[in-house]
Image: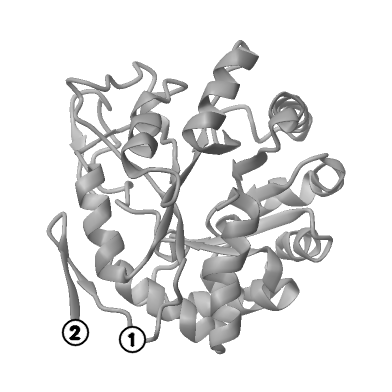
Amino acid sequence: MTAGTILGVPQSAPDFAVPPGACDCHVHVFGPASRYPWSPDRTYTPGEAGVDDLLDLQRGLRLDRVVIVHPGPYGTDNRRTLDALRQLGPRRARGVCVIAPSTEAATLRAMHSDGIRGARVNLELKGRQDPGLAADLLRRTADTVGPLGWHLQAYTRLSVLDALHDVIQALPIPFVVDHFGRAAASGGPDQPGFAALLSLLRGGRAYVKLSAANRISSHPETADAAPIARALIAANPDRVLWGTDWPHTGGAGRDGDPAATIEPFVPVDDGAALNRLAAWAGDPALTRRILVDNPARLYGF
């Protein structure tokens, strides 16, 4: 069975009873460029993927809630994300923003009213993999957003998580790791740095998103991601989230001028990804914790 076609990609229908209140914890919304201008410093230019497309995906996968993560091509201009949150409404949507050191407290409070519940830092940008610089950025951002009750989300790799383990454990707010911590699916649970991620989960200060398995796997069905996913769930099922990473940036086109080429989205079957989560969890009650209870706690649904 299919759940329809979204942005030209056929989506499998869920093969299990998706629990009410289930949440996709990692999506982006793009365009139109005429209304939401791109950052001149962007590293890629995506196509359009609007709120109506997102709602089609939500309906097809029988999901009731969503978290919009502000994407890199907009820099610290959060208008596209904030407008999407207003359009979707507080019963369905929450967001994660990107801020600058100069972002004022009044701006943060206004974003909170629109549904923002976290700030994202990209530690994959040039220079931010240095542990000292990364630690300072995490501490400063946590101090800025902590008074609002927000969390801190990071796109980073296992080696950085390993180097910053104690810093992350000491943060005064929850810490969320994107996309399996960029663990290589082929490396399995014994790969260098993975133990640090497991430790952060067991300590209860960090969450991990089982999102974008296609980013860490070269297998067509991402079957080699299963051991990693199951190890993360076993470490602390109350600190595991799931997301699609829709509409899947990262297609061809990043070798040239990022402003000159519209990068195609990667064709990913998100319904199949949702079904794999249920298989990884192996139990309806555990699946519900990952899809419903954990997002409700972290994002305040």
Label 1: which secondary element: loop
Residue that numbered label 2 is attached to? 1
- Quadrant of the image occupied by residue 194: bottom right
Decide if residue 219 is in sight here.
Answer: no
Where residue 64 appears, x then y in whole percent? Answer: 39, 62
Quarter placement of the N terminus:
bottom left
First-in-chain label (1 vs 2): 2
Contact (CB < 8 A) between labels 1 and 2? yes
Residue at the (59%, 22%) spot, across then down = 108
- Quadrant of the image occupied by residue 42: top left
Question: How many badges with numbers are in the image?
Answer: 2
Q: Is residue 80 left or right of residue 94?
A: left
Q: 255 or 143, which is in the foreground?
A: 143
Residue at the (30%, 37%) spot, across then down = 254
Where residue 275 appears, x then y in whole percent? Answer: 39, 80
Q: 17 or 3, which is in the foreground?
A: 17
179, above or below 233, in the image: above
* Mark 1 surroundings: few (<14), some (14-19) or many (≥20) residues within 10 A: some
Residue 61 got which mark? none
Decide if residue 301 is in sight here.
Answer: yes
Q: Amino acid at mark 1?
A: Asp
Residue that numbered label 1 is attached to? 15
Where residue 187 appears, x then y in whole percent? Answer: 59, 71
Label 1 to label 2, Cα distance in Å? Answer: 9 Å
Residue at the (29%, 35%) spot, across then down = 255
* Mark 2 surroundings: few (<14), some (14-19) or many (≥20) residues within 10 A: few
Where residue 276 appears, x then y in whole percent? Answer: 43, 79
